[in-house]
Amino acid sequence: VAIDAVQIEQVLVNLCINARDAIAGAGRIGIAIRCSQVADHVCASCRARADGAWVELVVSDTGHGIAQHVMERMFDPFYTTKEVGQGSGMGLAMVHGIVHDHGGHVLVSSSPGGGTTFRICLPAANAQLPRDPSRPAPATPGAAPKLHGRVLLVEDQPMVADFMSELLQNWGLQVTLHRNPADAHEWFTRDPQRVDVMITDQTMPVMTGVELAAAVTSVRPDLPVLVYTGYGEGLVENELRSAGIVALLKKPIEPAVLRAHLERVLPGRHFHEAAATSPEPLSR
């Protein structure tokens, strides 16, 4: 298959971590690679039909299985059934994003007490499989091209901050993370030209993301700012624009949407511009 080596490692590690947790220290995890012909199956994450010839990466376990109500939501970003501090809820969301970015699907079979099997279906490197017309065509046959730029990331929740930082770095970006907006503002004002874009949460102590955006763009008006929030209903568009905010993203963040906005605003881009229409400013 044509896939980024780091990203397929992330897929494998995330599935194995979940399998390890499912067996709770006593059981077996199986890993296999095989060619398969899939018929009458639906992707567990995007719900599209996954019929066809695939190369499969399979991770199975003899654990407690997955309840149906969890199956329906387990690929949602930030959804987790683990105890606080034991997981960010981004593992399977990341698996979903990577697999679908490479033209694949995820098949899952599980039963309570009967274990779970994840089948990661990827197109063979020489395959010319039909593309889902609802999804934009990939820029290249393999992994998405790297992005180039410097990002100031402001997020006070450790698990979300770590996930966002890792996601952006995997795309090729240089990330400076601040968990306190006041610290981020002070750091920024010492050299306002050292970043190309700021990404910030809205709800934080000391100041909100909108307030931080207004503060940094008063120093550097041309800096694009992306704000994400789970409570954006009360934000006024004129206020967002005056603060230099070019996009308001909804939590949980969809990585493909975030990347599309970054491709639009980063300067000196060296990556392929997708043929799809760029998202409108302040799209939600």
Image: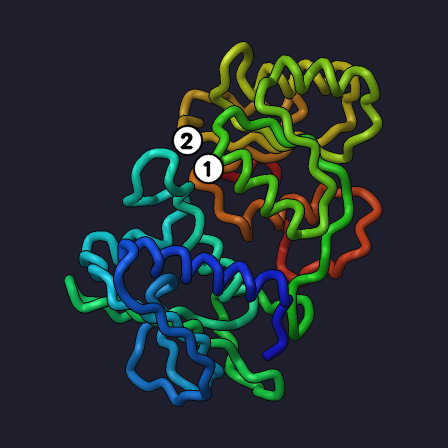
- Percent across and percent down for residue 268 are 84, 47
Q: Which element is circle 1 on?
A: strand
Taking the image as drawn, is residue 193 in sight?
A: yes
- Percent across and percent down for residue 180 are 58, 18
**Label 2, on which residue?**
230
Disc marking residue 250? 1
Foreground pick, 18 / 166 = 18
The residue at 39%/42% (across/down) is: 87
Q: Amino acid at mark 2?
A: Gly
The residue at 58%/45% (across/down) is: 258
Relative to residue 185, is residue 123 drawn left or right? Answer: left
Taking the image as drawn, is residue 279 in sight?
A: no
Foreground pick, 239 / 217 = 217
Q: Amino acid at mark 1?
A: Lys
Relative to residue 82, is residue 54 drawn left or right? Answer: right
Q: Quadrant of the N terminus?
A: bottom right
Q: Which element is circle 2 on?
A: loop
- Percent across and percent down for residue 166 are 60, 45
Q: CA distance from mark 2 to mark 1?
A: 6 Å
The residue at 36%/85% (across/down) is: 38
Contact flag, marks 2 and 1 (Cβ < 8 Å): yes
Relative to residue 112, is residue 123 drawn left or right? Answer: right
Q: Earlier in the sequence, mark 2 or mark 1?
A: 2
Q: Is residue 157 above or below residue 75?
A: above
Report which quarter residue 271 is drawn in.
bottom right
Q: Is residue 273 above or below residue 149?
A: below
